[in-house]
Amino acid sequence: MNFPKLKTVFSSLLLTVFSLTSCSSSAQIGKLLDKAEQLAGNPSTSEISSGLKEALKKGTGISVDRLSLQDGYLGNLDVKILFPEEAKSVENTLRSLGFGSLCDQVITSLNRAAEDAAQEAKPIFTAAIKQMSFQDVQKILLGESDAATTYFEQSTTASLTEKFSPIIDTSLKKVDATKYWSDVMNQYNRIPLVKKVDTDLTAFVTKKAIDGLFVEIAKEELKIRQNVGARTSPLLQKVFGYADRQK
């Protein structure tokens, strides 16, 4: 162990701490704190901010790209959009009567609409990342394993809903989801004594599409927190290594 070197680092840290008492500006204090962190082998505040934002941009980008592919929703059991809960009885009844193919067409078309809209999420996530304060960054980096996902849910859901809704509405018509849904309901409503179901298809698919995005973002967040191999740059390794040491 290099004791002279440790002594030098310790002395520098003490000088930094004592210097804080004579600093009048927050900028000066911030610089001294950064110096102290660097002497201790920890990332600076700017490195923490840059590293976390790099990770979030990467994670949201992967999630969006994955879901916007054909079968991005349909082929992913974690996010696949099925019949609305209030229409489960519709699906079950029609399948029992031999209309399983029609039900499958509905499910496929709902997921195609979500896949059409998914790519539009990228600029919304990018804007949310850019506007993060350092307090947001710290809270996410040192927070729970889903802290980033929670941040995005709180900061982007309204914007995603506004952006997705008209795209999904158009896509539902383009992929004949509206037609298939009408066909399903018409067949179901012919059955005597059944309770009619009234579902806002656009609102339902929009919500499910956004929920699916957050499911995938949560996966990417957990991956970079738990898997060192997912930290693909020196900055990510430094910042998330620091986070690991704080736990």
Image: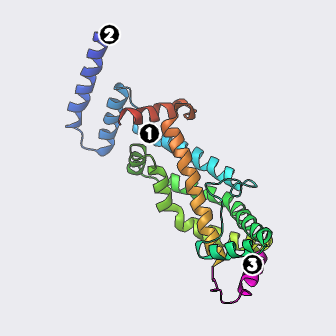
Q: In which quarter of the image is residue 22?
A: top left
Q: Give the range drawn in magenta.
A: 179-199
Q: Quadrant of residue 38?
A: top left
* Residue where numbered disc 2 is placed: 2
Return the residue found at the far front: 96
Q: Which of 58 and 31 is in front in this view?
A: 58
Q: In this view, does 56 lie above or below 6?
A: below
* Residue where numbered disc 1 is placed: 48
Kind of residue at disc 3:
Val
Kind of residue at disc 1:
Ile
Q: How far apart are marks 3 and 2 (CA)?
A: 76 Å
Q: Distance between the residues labelled 2 and 1?
A: 28 Å
Q: In this view, does 192 lie above or below 229?
A: below
Q: Residue 109, percent across and down? A: 75, 67
Identify the mark nearer the N-term, 2 or 1. 2
Left/right placement of residue 209 relative to residue 222 reads right
Q: Residue 98, percent across and down? A: 79, 72
